Image: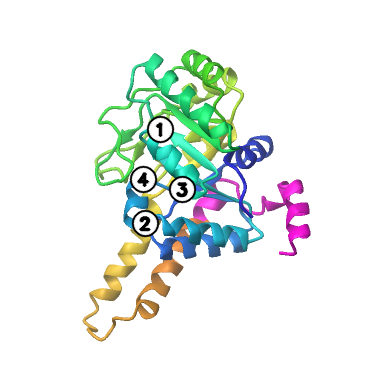
Amino acid sequence: MLITGKEMLDVAKANKFAVPAFNAGSGQLLTAIMESAEEKQAPFIMAIHPSELKFLRDSFVAQVIYECNHSRIPIAIHLDHGASIEQVIHAIQLGFTSVMIDSSHLPFEENIKVTQEVVKIAHSVGVSVEAELGTIGDTGNTVEGGVTEVIYTDPDRAAEFVSRTNIDSLAVAIGTAHGIYPKNVKPKLRLDILEKITKAVDIPLVLHGGSSNPDEEIAKAVQLGISKINISSDIKISFTEKLREILNNSNFEIREPNAIFPECINVCRKTADQKIDLFNAADKVKCFSLFDKVVAGAGL
C-alpha cells in the first residue's frame, strides 16, 4: 500500500527503527526489494534519483505504483536528491508521495528559501518533503553526487532550519559519503554530532550514504534516532557482481533476461535482507495499525 514519507517516518521514529530507502535503478532491483520486504515484513521507501528516472523513463513510476498498491507492505515513493523545484513538481505529477529538495550546497538562507517553496508546493497536495543541511561526501561513481569534503550539520542551525521550513524529515551530514569507500579509507560517523541534533530537532532524521559503513556504527545511529537510511551502491554492486559472473562464464548461449537475472535478483535480495535486519526494520509492518485497517478494507 502506497503511503507518504511522513506517514512512514513518523512511525519509524516512534518505534525506533530506520526505514531502508532503496534506490530503484531497474525493474530487476525493484523485484528484489519487493520480494525481500514482503518476506521480511518490512516497510520501505523506493527512492528514485532524477538521473535514474531519466534512464528508466516516467512510465517506470507507474510500475512502482502498481507494485505498491498490490502489496500488503507500506511503501513510499521518494524523489532522491531533487535538484530543482521543476524536478520536484514533475515527481509529484508522476505520483511520488515524498520528495527531497537538495539545496545543501547553497548558503543557509538560500537553502531555506528554496526549501520553503518546495514545502509550500508539496504540502498543498499531501506530499512529504525531505531536505538536507550540511553536505554529504562523494566517493566517486554514484548518481547521487556529493562533495569531496563533508561539512557536518550544525545542531543549532538544524533546529532553526526545521522551524523555518516546516520540512517532514532532515538529512544530516555526520560523516557518510555516497558510494563505496576506497580500500584505504575507513569511514567514521560523528555520532556525537548526531546525539546533539536529535536533542535539537523533533522530526525524523535521515542518513545518506549508508552503503559500506561499519554495521556497528549504522546500528548505533539507528538507536540514536536515525529514521531513514539510503542504500544504493550496496544493492547495485551485489547485483552487478553476480551479473558479471554469469556473463563471464563462457556460455555464449545465455541471452534471455529470464535466464540471466534471477540469480542476480536473489543475490541482491540477500543484501537487502541484511540491511533490513541491520536497520531493525524487519517485522515492523505490524507498527502500522491504521495501515492494517486500510489493507483489510481494500481486500489485499
Find disc 1 in the rendering and name its residue: 85
Task: For the residues labelled 4 and 1, say whether their Cβ atoms are less than 8 Å apart.
Answer: no
Alpha carbons under labels 4 and 2: distance apart: 10 Å
Q: Which residue is drawn at 43% across and 59% down?
A: 60
Give the residue type at disc 3: Ala
Asked where in the image residue 14 lies, by quadrant, the reply is top right
Highlighted range, magenta:
274-300
Label located before the other in sequence (4 or 1): 4
Where is residue 241? Give x, y as percent: 31, 64
Marks 2, 3: nearer the viewer: 2
Label located before the other in sequence (3 or 1): 3
Find disc 3 in the rendering and name its residue: 47
Q: Is mark 1 on a helix, strand or loop?
A: helix
Label located before the other in sequence (1 or 2): 2
How many C-alpha atoms fall within 10 Å of the one at disc 2: few (<14), some, or many (≥20)? few
Q: Residue 57 carries which label?
A: 2
Q: What element carries label 3?
A: strand
Alpha carbons under labels 4 and 1: distance apart: 12 Å
